Image: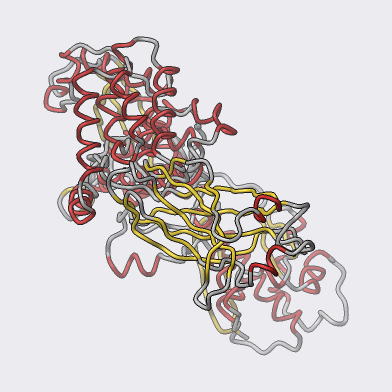
Amino acid sequence: MQMIEKVLLGDASFWGKSKKQNYVSLSTAKAEYIATGSGCTQLLWMKQMLKEYNVLQDVMTLYCDNLSAINISKNPIQHTRTKHINIHHHFIKDLVEEKIIALEHVETELQLADIFTKALDVAKFEKLRGKLGICKECVKKRSKLNLFDPALVMESSCEPNFSFGFNDIHYSDRVLRIEFIPDPVYADRHRMKKRQKVLNGNQPVDMDDDDETCVNNDSNSAAATVVRVETLHISSLILAAQSPFFLKLFSNGMSETKQRHISLRIYASEEDGLMELLKFLYSNTLNITAAPALLDVLMAADKFDVPSCMRYLLNLPMTPDSASLYLELPHTVDAFQPLIDAAKQYLVGRYREITNDKYREKHMALSLSAIEAILASDGLQVSSEDGVYDFALNWARQKYDSLKERREVLATRLACLIRFPYMTCQKLEDVLTCNDFEHESASKLVLEALSSKAEAPHCQRPLAAEESISLNRRFRARAYKQLFYMHLEWKDCVSLFPSGHVDSEPFDFGGQMFFLSAQCNMDNNGSHCFALSLGMKESCSGSIDVDYEFTARLKKTKEFISLHKSNCTFNGGTHIGCKNLFDVPWTFFIEENSIFFVNGSLHLAAELTITH
């Protein structure tokens, strides 16, 4: 029989052994009982070894999936069925009675040793492998010899937890001496204002010109006065396994340094971030949620090269607060880019209907960085750019009471994200008279918009393509999408015969004025029928590519069904649609009990989408 022993210290796999038993067992219970005794000898040896390191162990638990073997160890009475077992195997009974070993039953499905002895299905194999602390991607990572690649995301459920050993002399091999030096005056002011910016929803904070020149210069810190020293007992293996910075700190060239006392000098303002980061390296989890504290940890993770902290945050559920926080991270740091991209994607998906008055209160509470990420997207579910402009203007007025600050934010941060060429001419006139824009800046924006509207389609597209890779997206059309309705009474439809038409009220879509037109038309066979078309006002300039779909509500189902789909490039005066919308003669369409009229009314709808 194959004998498997596996020892765990905390959540980590510590020792293992696989050996074929060198004697014949007359029963499964005997084989399990003998294997359990062998496991006890290993536990006793390890307990004695840990004791020499001043690591004291209480009752050690040994798991066995055979109830008969457990009952034999707990029953001191000798039975006929166990008298054939050699006496030296019964020492396990003494260990149980003296409470040195606790022998407990474990279900067969949870027996870790089965992964080494049995043919398992994929689900059970991965489950047991996870309990052993072996990650699904470990083999792949080790084969590439790139353990610190941020792109490789590890499963958090497989991360070991060594929090019990943090700053514990019994689980440490090094002493980390952290020396704190005072922050430079300008750096401290810059940091405090950065914190205030995060807490105040990313509103601008007045900063002197000198503040912008402050950096954390390590060369200057070498000559600074140490104001305080903190000493921690650490494990070099735990820290070096997750951070190339600590790996280099604990090594001397290619070999491990023999120095047991390591010094690290940081600014006093970095203390909280570093301490939380060190706790994370032991526990693989963060216990903080406040925005400023989390920002400090992220900055420390970047400074001390701990990509696993970034991966941990990527696996956490995103929230509006955390997304806004990630957007404040430096965009020039490559390690932060996955967090920043994930935050943008989350905000765009959550606030796609940015102009919907139903969610106005939530939208108005967003930070400036969140508003920028949302308005930069081409996939907003809005009907026109007029609504986007009105929202941005109202948001700025609510956030900034000072006209100077409001003008600065609109001119430098938001104007480049509003697609002025796709606004209506009437709204562009409002821009010229808006006091929240400098007159010179407003005139330039409106002039560019009108020039773009007047351009031919083949001239507009290259300009939009040039700006697709930049933050300035004024000339790129969004995927505007809107549903417009038209209702006609039965008597109004009767009056259309033989060649009349009735138009809906004009509506704004993508910066152009459209309308629906219902009419009595002649089909290809010369018969009268009901027609519906979509048109752009002749006064409109420029062109726009539109996918459109006509739907109508039927009496039987009282639901809208699709009747006609198409696409067209609209210019001023373009008029296109379906000659016979219901594909029936006029007489059948207009009869008294027509299936197309619900309570005496014809309900039509047109769904329009701008295509790039």
Q: Position of residue 196 (x, y in %)?
A: 38, 17
131, 57: nearer the viewer? 131
Please name the residue shown 87% across and 69% down the image. 77
Q: Position of residue 451 (x, y in %)?
A: 20, 39
362, 501: nearer the viewer? 501
Q: Quadrant of the C terminus?
A: bottom left
Q: Position of residue 395 (x, y in %)?
A: 43, 24
Residue 495 left/right relative to 213: right
Q: Is residue 286 above or below residue 575?
A: above
Q: Is residue 73 visible?
A: yes
Please name the residue shown 75% across and 55% down the image. 598
As drawn, the residue found furthest toward the front would be: 498
Residue 289 left/right relative to 339: right
Callout count: 0
The part of the image, by quadrant, that contains residue 422 is top left
State how the image is colored. secondary structure
Q: Is residue 40 above or below residue 428?
A: below
Q: Is residue 133 above or below residue 376?
A: below
The part of the image, by quadrant, that contains residue 225 is top left
Q: Position of residue 286 (x, y in %)?
A: 48, 38
Q: Is residue 158 above or below residue 539?
A: below
255, 418: nearer the viewer? 418
Q: Quadrant of the N terminus?
A: bottom right
465, 245: nearer the viewer? 465
Residue 277 left/right relative to 331: right
Q: Is residue 54 visible?
A: no
